[in-house]
Image (tube, rainbow, N blue to C red):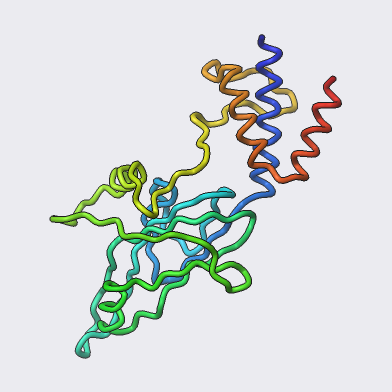
């Protein structure tokens, strides 16, 4: 049983390493975007974020200083959600230029949000506002987005599969221990998941690896 489990763990590690190396998505955000959450997790605010290949969700606010009656005024939009699917590519979150209070009013009423690929053309995505009535200070966005995603809202994030645990197996070469919480059944499920996420080239190398083990 240990030998079979270790083999599953090794195969999962192989596929996970290959997939992460070959299939990442990078999203570039404008300076006016303040990132709140990525895939239900709090992240450091950044203008470039690397995501896993496939379905992803970003929650952000537009945050800029604009001119209002000759004075500088800080504007922060409601929390916006964008959910999209991309594969091994760089995409850009595009927002309109916000210079005046009129610009921010227009954006609040009708947010003009776009996601484009390297060719400048829009990719498929859905967007919504993460709304909360009443007092806004001290909002728990992690809890709010989890509730939102549990619903049938239009920009809810429902990835096709989520590994239920983190990969904790050791390196392939010289590995001599496994996580006792990872059963052979879980390892097999993870193997199926990572195989489906791998590129065709990685799948071919994996098949060759299996042949060499017989």
Residue nearest the viewer, comparing 41 with 133: 133
Q: Residue at x 50, y 36 (%)?
A: 162
Q: Residue at x 29, y 78 (%)?
A: 106
Quarter of the rendering containing residue 206? top right
In the picture, measured across the screen, residue 167 lies left or right of residue 203, that is: left
Quarter of the rendering containing residue 73? bottom left
Residue 146, above or below 79: above
Q: Residue at x 64, y 18 (%)?
A: 177
Q: Position of residue 122 (x, y in %)?
A: 54, 69
The single residue placed furthest to the bottom in the displayed view is 70
Image quadrant where one finds the C terminus: top right
Quarter of the rendering containing residue 120? bottom right
In the picture, measured across the screen, residue 170 lies left or right of residue 63, that is: right
Residue 12, above or below 76: above
In the picture, measured across the screen, residue 161 lies left or right of residue 31, that is: right
The number of numbered badges drawn on the structure is 0
Residue 213, above or below 79: above
Residue 127, above or below 183: below
The single residue placed furthest to the top in the displayed view is 1
Q: Position of residue 111 (x, y in %)?
A: 34, 71
Q: Position of residue 130 (x, y in %)?
A: 29, 56
Image quadrant where one finds the N terminus: top right
Q: Residue at x 56, y 48 (%)?
A: 52
């Amino acid at each position: 049983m240990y030998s079979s489990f270790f083999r599953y763990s090794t195969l999962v590690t192989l596929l996970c390493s290959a997939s992460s190396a070959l299939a990442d998505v990078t999203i570039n955000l404008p300076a006016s975007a303040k990132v709140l959450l990525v895939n239900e997790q709090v992240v450091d605010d950044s203008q470039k974020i690397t995501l896993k290949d496939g379905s992803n969700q970003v929650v952000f606010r537009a945050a800029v200083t604009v001119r209002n009656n000759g004075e500088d005024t800080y504007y922060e939009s409601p929390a916006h959600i964008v959910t999209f699917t991309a594969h091994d590519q760089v995409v850009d979150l595009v927002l309109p230029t916000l210079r005046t209070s009129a610009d921010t009013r227009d954006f609040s009423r009708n947010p003009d949000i776009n996601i484009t690929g390297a060719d400048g053309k829009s990719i498929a995505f859905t967007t919504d506002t993460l709304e909360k009535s009443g007092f806004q200070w001290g909002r728990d966005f992690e809890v709010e987005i989890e509730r939102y995603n549990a619903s049938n809202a239009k920009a809810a994030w429902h990835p096709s599969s989520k590994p239920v645990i983190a990969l904790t197996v050791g390196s392939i070469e010289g590995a001599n221990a496994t996580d006792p919480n990872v059963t052979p059944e879980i390892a097999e499920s993870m193997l199926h998941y990572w195989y489906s996420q791998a590129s065709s080239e990685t799948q071919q190398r994996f098949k060759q690896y299996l042949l060499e083990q017989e």
